[in-house]
């Protein structure tokens, strides 16, 4: 069980490597591939940093970390956390997937004239006045999940109305959107209540994050399938 937990603990680092491997083997040229690959690279780098902060004792860098970097990662409770990387990833994920949807229809281009800018402004206001960036922002991640789920449902609606499409399953980007829809739908309530859970029951919060990690693996498997099918 500890072995399985270790795999899940590091899944946010290794699972994006699956679609990245597919990308480097297949080298698809479709326009929508670029923002997806950028997201995978950014996710690996940020979560690798987050896991290093989290696993610093396991990695035997606790003393060095506390002496040199600890003050940069302290939340309002004075504890060292890796939440900054998740908050940055949330902003990056939304902006990169908004860019991805930009290639899937002119209607998305119209939506993207204002939604990403509003989201970015809300994030700046959130961390400037309401939230320490080293504290997990349930507000931001829940908003991000809501907006991305809206993009996904709007995509499914567009595909369903397009008579030129014989089967959505034949569209490579359909699998990216499906994986993203599953990920955001599963994690909306986790994100929404995670800050509360960390205060009320830290162990339960840690346990429920396994659900997030499993859904994240599913997302990356769907992205890998999409990249395999892409041209």
Image: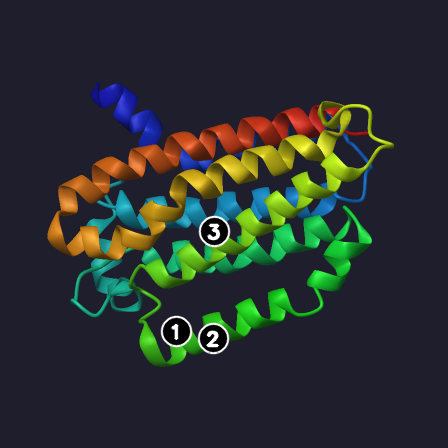
Q: Nearer the viewer, mark 1 or mark 3?
A: 3
The numbered disc on residue 127 is 1
Q: Secondary structure at mark 2?
A: helix
Q: Quadrant of residue 227?
A: top right
Q: Residues within 10 Å of mark 3 (few under 14, many from 20)?
A: many
Q: Is 39 rendered above or below residue 167?
A: below
The answer to whether the residue labelled 1 contacts the one labelled 2, judged by CB atoms less than 8 Å apart, is yes
Answer yes or no: is residue 58 visible.
no
Q: Which residue is more in the foreground, 210 or 38?
A: 210
Q: Residues within 10 Å of mark 2 (few under 14, many from 20)?
A: some
Estimate the spatial distance between the alpha carbons at disc 1 and disc 2, rounded to whole Å.
5 Å
**Residue indicated by mark 3:** 145
Q: Secondary structure at mark 1?
A: helix
Identify the residue at image location x=58%, y=42%: 40
Label whose residue precedes the other's in the sequence (3 or 2): 2
Q: Is residue 93 left or right of residue 30?
A: left
Q: Quadrant of residue 26?
A: top right
Identify the residue at image location x=50%, y=43%: 44
């Amino acid at each position: 069980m500890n072995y399985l937990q270790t795999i899940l603990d590091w899944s946010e680092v290794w699972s994006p490597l699956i679609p990245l491997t597919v990308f480097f083997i297949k080298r698809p040229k479709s326009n929508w591939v670029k923002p997806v690959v950028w997201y995978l690279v950014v996710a690996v780098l940020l979560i690798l940093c987050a896991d290093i902060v989290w696993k610093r004792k396991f990695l035997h860098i606790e003393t060095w970390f506390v002496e040199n970097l600890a003050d940069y990662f302290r939340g309002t409770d004075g504890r060292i956390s890796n939440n900054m990387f998740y908050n940055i990833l949330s902003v990056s994920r939304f902006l990169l997937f908004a860019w991805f949807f930009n290639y899937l229809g002119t209607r998305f281009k119209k939506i993207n004239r204002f939604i990403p800018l509003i989201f970015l402004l809300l994030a700046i206001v959130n961390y400037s006045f309401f939230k320490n960036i080293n504290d997990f922002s349930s507000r931001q991640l829940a908003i991000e999940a809501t907006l991305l789920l809206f993009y996904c449902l709007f995509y499914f609606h567009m595909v369903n109305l397009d008579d030129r499409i014989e089967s959505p399953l034949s569209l490579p980007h359909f699998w990216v959107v499906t994986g993203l829809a599953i990920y955001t739908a599963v994690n909306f309530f986790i994100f929404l209540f995670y800050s509360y859970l960390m205060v009320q029951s830290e162990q339960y919060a840690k346990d429920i994050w396994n659900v997030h990690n499993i859904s994240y693996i599913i997302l990356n498997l769907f992205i890998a399938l999409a990249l395999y099918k892409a041209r």
